[in-house]
Image (cartoon, rainbow, N blue to C red):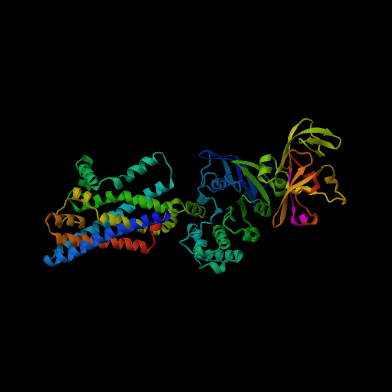
Amino acid sequence: MSSAASDPHLQIDSLSVRLGTFHLRDITLSCSRGEYHILMGPTGSGKSSLIKSVLGLIPIWDGCIRLHGRDITHDPPERRRMGYVPQNYALFPHLNVEENLRFAFKARNISRRDADSTVAELCGVLGIGQLLERRVDSLSGGERQKVALGRALAAQPEVILLDEPFSSIDEGARRALWFELKRIITEVGVTALHITHNLEEAYALGERLSILINGDLVQSGSKQDIFEHPLSEDVARYLNYRNIFPGVTERHPAGTSIGLGHFHVIVGRNIREGQQVRLCVRQQDIKIIREGSPLKDSLRRNILPGRIVSLLPLPESCLMWFKIDGSPNTYDLELKFPAYIRVRHKLSPGQSIRVALWEPNIILF
Amino acid sequence: MNRLFGIFTVGAASLLCFFFLFLIGSMIVELGQESALKAPRSSEIFFAIRLSLVTATAASLIALFVSLPVAYLLSRYTFFGKDLVDTLLDLPIVLSPIALGAMLLIFFNTPLGHEIERLFGPFVFEVKGIILAQFFVVVGLSIRLLKSAFEAIDVEYENLARTLGYNQVQVFLRVVLPMAGKGLLASFLLVWGRAIGEFGATVTLAGATPLKTETIPVAINLSFASADISSALVFITILIGISLGILFFLRKVDVFGRL
């Protein structure tokens, strides 16, 4: 796990939560001031339980939560100054948009003048001025999200926690709203902890990411760290990396050769001989060799001949399943490349081709 | 098979509706014939209506007030012995009202019962006894209805209000109660309707003294006992009118979906 940020605004130390038979174990996570932190993990991994315990809505078993150095572990939710945008937004149906935005003011005894100026400011940032009189059940998914965000920000929280904020929004509208949300959070300057199980959303929005699997925080770090150097097979599998093989290391003049059954892979690193390892190559790090074209150095060591088993064209990319010559398996490797490559290489099932592994990105556990 | 099932369901519903309409129709015909023979005493009618309205309203309001925290507790929290508490509080729903009235009568013959009567005045054979009997008959129903109304509210609204600075009491008053508004109104009306028609527990604890503890159901019983069919029919018609009025109102404000 990477080290915590130097000046943590929100610091979670060794947090344990027990919820019946499910446990969150020894969670340590930190966010610096103004950071946009993504907490991701598969469904049922405990992401929502973790943020509810941070909010004070679920009692914690052990550990400590600090906000700007102040221990808030045992503070009730109303005193934590943390904003919350739940998955379904939970806009109060008996109140209109403006009343929802003003809801926090009554609890915090904010003067009418300050309340008016905060609402005006939020309407400007969120672009929801025209919605103030509307009933919340007449709003679109994106409008609901903005009102929920505005309601949370109206309380001027130190940290905002967003629980799958795009889960109720149509696929087509999501991407535009990702950047809109990020823009608003950045403009307001609040620290954000955003939960998602969507990898693209995590990659697009997160500055730092943490991965929670089955109640354990298995990796925390920068976006590049997480996506390029997963620390375990569990993380790699969660990130949807399919090409994972068990192997044994052997000495090689160029570094280390890893025997993977019917083929082997050479890496430049020196690893002790006879060690059991697991090797992972991301789908996008396997390149199709265009015969006759010059090959980059990083691709020269691991060239594998074989044939295409099947192709799955998607709107923006294409998936390909590839069988190495002499392999007893149905297929050995899964590749992902831009959609135009299929047309350019005239790829079709059964075709014999050669592929090469991008050596710098070969991951070993 | 599908057609047969359709005929069966529609047939059962039609038969039942026809039966109820026939009951009401035959009573109206009978009322027309009896009224011509003998006019019921208006003072007794007004007394019974007034007493029923006052006692049913008081009992329902008290039941609602007591049920609110209990129903909220049962809808939101899990605790040791919850099933036992739930079962115990459901008892008035399934227990015969006469048995409940008898239990109250026996209770007021105990030292604690005597002490309560010393502090708050007599209950047995008194108007206060009617309110108490009606309260115990309807409180289980009131808890059950309010619990359903609270369970229909996603707990996430309450969580969210807590993060916006509201404590638990403020959340209950500013989020739960307004959101359960229609459910509360429906619960009150159904409980009130049940209370105004209550007979068994009332007659056992408060007796059936004309112009003293004579609610509408007691008046119907007294009229039948003295072969005064005209008065009985008038009281029955009033009770049907009240019941239909409540049900019609509940449908108009669309609250059945919440229960």
Closest to the observer: A218 or A312?
A: A312
Residue lying furthest bottom in this view?
Answer: A130
Quadrant in the picture for residue A62: top right
Quadrant in the picture for residue A145: bottom right
Q: In the rendered view, does B92 fall on the left or right side of A76?
A: left
x and y percentages locating residue A158 in the rendered image: 59, 53
Q: Residue at x 29, y 63 (%)?
A: B245
Q: Residue at x 43, y 43 (%)?
A: B78
Q: Is residue A331 magenta?
A: no
Span shown in magenta? A333-342
Q: Relative to B162, is A140 above or below?
A: below
x and y percentages locating residue A178 in the rendered image: 64, 58
x and y percentages locating residue B121 in the rendered image: 20, 49
Screen quadrant of the N terminus of chain A: top right
Closest to the observer: A146 or B88?
A: B88
Please indicate, yes or no, whether residue B122 appears anywhere in the rendered image.
no
Q: Residue at x 33, y 45 (%)?
A: B89
